[in-house]
Amino acid sequence: MFDFSVVTTWINNLLIGCMPGWAAVLVECIIIALCVLGAYTVLALFYILYERKLCAWFQCRLGPMRVGYWGLLQVFADMFKILIKELIPLKGTDKFLFKLAPYVIITSSVTMLACLPWGRGMQIINYNIGIFFILAVSSVGILGILLAGWASNNKYTLIGAMRSGAQMVSYELSLGLAIITMVVFAGTMNIEEIVWAQDGGWFIFTGHIPAIIACIIYVIAATAETNRGPFDLPEAEHELTAGYHTEYSGIHFGFFYLAEYLNLFIVSGIASLMFLGGWMPFHVNGWDGFNAVMDYIPGIVWFVAKAFFFSFVIIWFKWTFPRVRIDQMLALEWKYLMPLALANLVLMAVCTTLGWHF
Amino acid sequence: MAVKSPAIRSMKHEDFKDNAYIDSLVEELNATGANVVVGKLDQLINWGRANSLWPLCFGTSCCAIEFMCLGAARYDMARYGAEVARNSPRQADYIMVQGTIVHRMAPVLRRLYEQLAEPRYVIACGGCAVSGGPFKNSYCVLPGVDKILPVDVYIPGCPPRPEAMFYGLMQLQRKIKVQKFFGGANRKEKIDEFFAKHSSEVGKY
Amino acid sequence: MANIQEKISKICPSVTFEEGETLLVSVPEKDWRMLAVALKENADLNFDVLTALIGMDWKDSLGVIYYFTSTARNWEMLSVKVAVEDREKPMIHTVSDLWKVANFQEREVYDFYGIEFIGHPDMRRFFLRNDWVGYPLRKDYDANPDLNPIRMEDEENEDDSHTLVEMPDGSIKRVETKVFAPEDYVVNIGPQHPSTHGVMRFRAAIDGETVTKVDVVSGYIHRGIEKLSEGMTYPQTLHFTDRMDYMSAHMNRHCLCMCIEKALGLEVPKRAQVIRVMMDELMRISSHLLAFGCTSMDMGATTCFFYGFREREMVLDIFEKTCGARMSMNYNVIGGVIADLHPDFVKDVKALIEVMPKALKEYHKVFSGNVIAKNRMVGVGMLSKEDAINYDITGPSGRGSNWSCDTRKKHPYSAYPDVQFEEVLEEGCDSYARYMVRMREIEESVKILEQLVDNIPEGEIRAQVPKIVKLPAGRWYQQVEASRGAFGVYIESTGEKTPYRLHFQSPCFNLVGVMDLTCRGNMIADLIVIGAALDFVIPDIDR
């Protein structure tokens, strides 16, 4: 398995060799920021196309076809258009908060993206409480939605924002509990260590029943966290026209749009990290030849492929299920998911202490 | 850099019906001239705009059902990248007025148009939107949306077939491709002219 | 009939009778309220359905024609005429407390003729702007565009309404009222809203997410079809019917043709009748498929919409081959149909018959059986059978409340007496029941097609019709079962080439009437589902 930290150390040494320490750190920060932003844009654009094509295939259609080969350039056309579209200033809005909201959302999702482990050594910061940090940052996104809904001074956006507040705060609980369950199993909150703990087998296999339950809970809660169908109430098109971002135009709307897709990647990334071993290749104990072959596939491919798999499942939900109602959604969380997640946590704790796992 | 006649994928220039109009637009733009860098940027912007036309969901009657067929599997508007039908006018690029506009709806339609973000386009789809159609003589029907909005493309039919709507969509794409973002003939001025002219006339119909 | 005449004249001696297609009872305004109460509540009369309420202008007087139906007595119909001489301030007593369906109908009459209804709780205009000058369907309406130019400013004082209260001494007092209380949080839904299926506008007062009141604001696509028809010859009026409820285009046109044929005494050839019925049933399938698609899409299950449309395209192909158009087919004409069937017709219909059962199975698997879809629809938008009758909710929505109201069974017409089919009834009284009735009706329509497709009789497709169609003086009312309920056409003729009055009684008009009743106490998200399950088509309401 190629260790990317070789590259980063080499760059670091190179920079320190030719400039003072503070300048080297500054340059590194800029390089990393550019990489993150670049990855963000590319991923978001890819995800937009991915979803549009997938949904088209679910619906016996072809999807974008005419811009570029098989519509590959479609999202670029969209991007150019949305970049130069008019930003409409609105009367009667809270101007500062109105403009702040999309940046809050995009910042939170960029920060979360920066925390993901892309491969061995390909991680920007290795916190000892990494997973906790991701959860904390993800909550900032709710603030952006609430701000957007409130500042727009529109009844639809306000209802959308209130719904999303209720929804996200509730589902954050199950999401957190599902992750804590896996943290209990891994024994650490450090992202890199969590990945290494899955060297012998991904958690979903080694953690068996409680891990599978946690995975299911996580996927449901993550769908709700990213405001996707069947939990897309905050932007329920057929009730609230466009929900909390009804009044946004141009690139401000573009930020919401990008963040929505990127959050999908991020929750899928966390799922792949917690359950399918992140960038860890598929290993079977004892099959050394097979394991060696698997190791040849770069970690980044493993990670991204696993994330795409989870995203596929979540997109599949969206294009299959009808939307739930707000009271049904809250009932699902508070009456079923959260008690189940709590019970599962206890089960996992028992399994871990008694060693009932592979 | 000269503006070229717009090309649409898989449909030849001479297969379109009203090339004279597009040619006149091209000539008008070429008369002023522009430098190469700006010209290239213009082309890129126009390519983006022309290929990412998000409609506003706006249907009042029968044409709206044909518009739904346009989005459905057989015709699949998504091929043009136009399936992202936005329900909020702020995020849409054009209104396809599908159906009769009556007196009570006219101010709503005008407001929707004003809520669209620039650049914004209008397609009058179906006989009713073009001229009032079979209801032209009624006491409360608007004889064509061009009385209150600057219309870019007219699609006749009652209702137009989805193919006709595609033709209209492609005409709009062609029209967008012969615009200039930097300098040259400014579309917005023309729209302002339209409203200046019509604000005095609007009560008459 | 004679029996009824006796009973009515015993209750109200001042009435006069006029024989016709249905018995017409003319009653002076002062006795109308008493007779109305008797018609509703007297066990011998028991007219529980107000089928149609038609405003009239007879030049010397204004008035209303009511059509009543008694479900208990084999769907017998009775018409009542109430006229007032006063053209300045015409007033008639309301029946909106007896038959709730009259609530909106009387507002329509007020809008068109300026007749105010004493005791009606909410006398606002229904279709036209509240600053409209004049009453357009009066014969002396001034159509000068300067009086009613296109106004680009919004309507003011939308909340203002008034009601006329009859004082104990017989004087009438006008009381100003407000639609919403100042403390109501009113959310405006429409006219441009993705799930109102057109340009309907609801103003919903909500408490949190719970709807406390719904105010229906209509008229955003009111094209004045009835007024336009008065200036056209009978064959010219036909094309309007395709553009009202475009999802029941064939049925609506069938109805108008039958009404004119009835007045002319024309016998439609057997082949034309069978073709008409087949087209009606194909239309019903197409309409219910659209309803399925829209219901699922409104709930966020977008994929089902595409599945529904996939099969709908097959129906549209059949229409296109025979009629030459996918929508607005303009196929029925007076005396028959305009063109003979396409040679592929039988083959295509058989292919459809083959596909539909499988497709339905798929729909049920993907959507009807889905636990979320069920949770969203079961128990939402309850409408009891009594309410359905009182609000005259016919069609799949009425049958979802277990009210047997299929016009094809109650007043069989065309080739329907010859085919076997079951009237689909559901006992749920909720949105899910309405939805399921639609899905099961597709099966019944397929059954009808199956019986007819191999038995299309040979012969003429059109009867001999005079070059200039002139109806004798009189009045006729004809009903058919359109996709969304009983569609009625009322023609009053004075013997001219053009109708003196042509009224379309649309089923969707009644459907929006129950929005307030069914939505109260439900959530705002349910409002969308209830609307989708009632499945109204806006141009049919506004006409």
Image: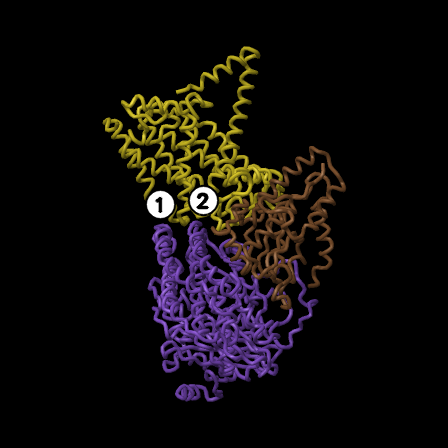
Chain colours: A yellow, B brown, C purple
The residue at the far right in this view is B31
- Residue A55: numbered disc: 2
Q: Is residue C465 left or right of residue C371?
A: right
Residue at position x 58%, y 59% from top? B99
Classify residue C473 by image quadrant. bottom right
| The quarter of the displayed image where residue A151 is located | top right
Viewer-proximal residue among A149 and B150: B150
Question: In the rendered view, would you say A291 is above or below C138?
Answer: above
Disc 2/disc 1 C-alpha distance (Å): 26 Å
Disc 1 chain ID: A
Percent from the top left, x then y, of residue C202?
A: 51, 59
Amino acid, disc 2: Cys
Q: Camera-side residue: C302 or C527?
A: C302
The reply to whether residue C96 is in sight is yes
Where in the figure is residue B86, as x and y percent of width and height? 54, 48
Q: Amino acid at mark 1?
A: Leu
Lower position in the chain sequence, tag 2 or tag 1: 2
Nearest to viewer (mark 2 / mark 1): 2
**Quadrant location, the C terminus of chain C:** bottom right
Q: Position of residue A314 (x, y in %)?
A: 40, 40
Residue positioned 73% across, 53% down in the render: B196
